[in-house]
Image (cartoon, rainbow, N blue to C red):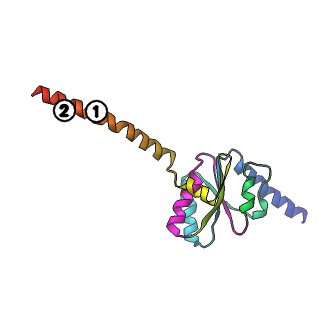
Amino acid sequence: MSVEAQKAKQVIIDEIKEKLDGAQSAVVIDYMGITVAQADAMRKKLREANVDYTVYKNTLVIAGTEFEGLAEVLDGPSALAISKDDATAPARVLNEVIKDFKKMEFKAGVVEGNFFDKDGIQTIADIPSRDVLLAKFLGSIQSPVSKAVRTFQAIADAKAE
């Protein structure tokens, strides 16, 4: 390998290391079979969820990081979706895209330091976002309180008559 090729490869390796540094999750997906328009739409959804999405050569995976388990699934075309903010965002957003396009599939992922195979990432992808879970939780707390308030108000109204 020429010196220039080695330097170019090192630049990409450094870029991947930087993206993975502090990441909560990284998901590998087989992205083949989608059109350019579908790829653009997918990238837009991922950007909106603050997820970095990049296609790399499989030989450029970083050993010695918590993401090195992904090396075992990096055969054939692969893309890497990384999130530093929301551990489930890459899997969740890509799952929506897979359902919409009926193409692509998960290969594996690492979420908060734990390796998950294809089925494990699918399970994580089905988990609602933190905001949705909080809204459901608050709704479940608010419902009994609201019911109690209405009951007390009905009793007070009945006594007032």
Q: Position of residue 144 (x, y in %)?
A: 33, 36
Q: CA distance from mark 2 to mark 1?
A: 10 Å
Point out the stretch of residues depicted in magenta: 75-102
Query: Pointer 1: what residue?
Result: 148
Question: Do the CB atoms of the residues marked 2 and 1 lie less than 8 Å apart?
Answer: no
Q: Is 79 in the magenta? A: yes
* N-term-proximal mark, 2 vs 1: 1
Report if residue 44 is visible in the image.
Answer: no
Q: Is residue 137 magenta?
A: no
Q: Residue at x 85, y 64 (%)?
A: 5
> 6 or 160, which is in the foreground?
160
Secondary structure type for disc 1: helix
Q: Residue furthest left?
A: 161
Task: Say whether residue 136 is left or right of residue 39.
Answer: left
As helix, strand or loop, the secondary structure at mark 2 comes to helix
Q: Is residue 115 above or below residue 2?
A: above
3 relative position to 11: left or right: right
Structural crowding at the residue carrying mark 1, measured as other residues with C-alpha within 10 Å and reported as few (<14), some (14–19) or many (≥20): few
Q: Circle 2 sits on which residue?
A: 154
* Residue 88: percent from left, percent from top: 57, 50
